[in-house]
Image (tube, rainbow, N blue to C red):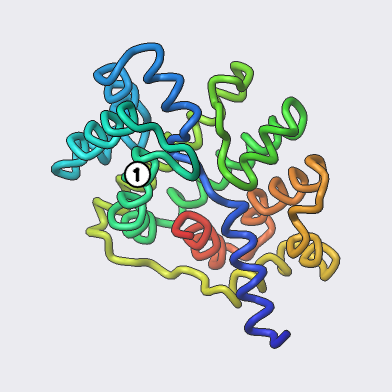
Amino acid sequence: MALEGRNKQIALTVAVMLVVAFVTSGAWMMSKKSSGLDGAVAELRALPLIGAVMAEVPGTEARLRAAIEEEERSPTRQGPNRAFIVIADLRKNYISPALAAADDASADAVMTARSELAHHLQQANLPACREFSTTGIQHTDKLDPEGQRLFRNVLLAMEAAYRNGRTAGAQPRPVANDQGFVAMLSEAGFTPVDFQKLGDSLKLSDAELCALQLRMDAAPASLAADNRGAFARYVLTH
C-alpha cells in the first residue's frame, strides 16, 4: 500500500476510535420510556453541548422533537435512530466548524477530559471502554457514578470548545491532515506494531483496544506545543 493510502487507512481507523457519542440510541430509549416525548426533549436540552446547539441553532428543537416522535411511532430496527441522525447532521454543519475554530487550550482540554474518561474505564469498565473506542458508549446510565461524571465532563469540555470556536467566528485554525496526524502519533510514541494493531482493531481484546484509546487521547502531552492544537482539532472534527 502506498504511504498516502496507508496514512489514510490509519487515520480513518483512528477517527472511528475517537468518536464521542453526543447521544446514543440506548440513552434515548431510556429517556423516552421514563419521561415521554417532552421529557426526552428536555433531557436532550439539559445535555452539555447538545443543549447549547438547541438554544443557538434555529429549528433544532423542532427537528429533534419530530425525530423522537416519529421514532416512537415507528422505531428504527437497524442503524442509528432518527434523533441520532439529526444530531449527526448538526455535528457536521454546526458543531465541527465551530470546533475547527476552537483555540489550542479549549481543544486540548477536550483531549484531557477524554483521557481521564478512558483511564477510568480502563480500570472500571473495559466493555464500555471498547464502546467508547468504536460506536460510542451505548448506555451511559450503566456507567458507575465516576464514569458518568467523567463522561459529562467530556461533553462540558466539548461545549466549551464549541462556544470558543463560535466566539471566534468559526474561522478555522490549523488542523492536521491525515498524513500529519499519523506523523504526530509517531511523535507521541506509536510504533509500526501499534499501527498494525490499529489496522486490526476489531480483533483486539477490550484491554488492548482500551490501552490504544488511552494512548491516543493522552498523545497531545507528548507533542510539541505547536502541534497539540492541530492534533486535537483533527480529533474533534473527524
**Rendered image quadrant of residue 158:** top left
Kindly identify the amino acid type of the residue bearing the numbered disc 1. Answer: Ile
> Can you name the residue that lies furthest to the top here?
34
Left or right for 95, reference 139: left
How many numbered circles are shown? 1
Left or right for 134, reference 149: right
Q: Secondary structure at mark 1?
A: helix
Please state the horizontal and vertical placement of residue 67, each as a whole percent of the image: 28, 36
> Can you name the residue that lies furthest to the right here?
193
Rendered position, 216 above or below 51: below
Left or right for 100, reference 188: left
Look at 58% across and 41% down and name the residue there.
114
> Can you name the residue that lies furthest to the left here?
58
> Can you name the residue that lies furthest to the bottom here?
2
Left or right for 50, reference 149: left
Rendered position, 29 above or below 33: below
Look at 51% across and 51% down and name the residue there.
108
**Rendered image quadrant of residue 34:** top left
Look at 69% across and 48% down and name the residue there.
213
Q: Quadrant of the N terminus?
A: bottom right
Rendered position, 225 above or below 43: below
Q: Nearer the viewer, residue 43 or 177?
A: 43
- Crowd tier of the residue under label 1, counting other residues whose Cα lies within 10 Å: few below 14, some 14–19, many 20 or above: many
Please state the horizontal and vertical placement of residue 115, each as a whole percent of the image: 63, 42
Please state the horizontal and vertical placement of residue 28, each as a whole percent of the image: 42, 27
Q: Which residue is mark 1?
A: 87
Please state the horizontal and vertical placement of residue 167, each as a whole percent of the image: 24, 51
Q: Nearer the viewer, residue 18 or 89?
A: 89
Rendered position, 28 above or below 96: above
Look at 34% across and 38% down and name the residue there.
83
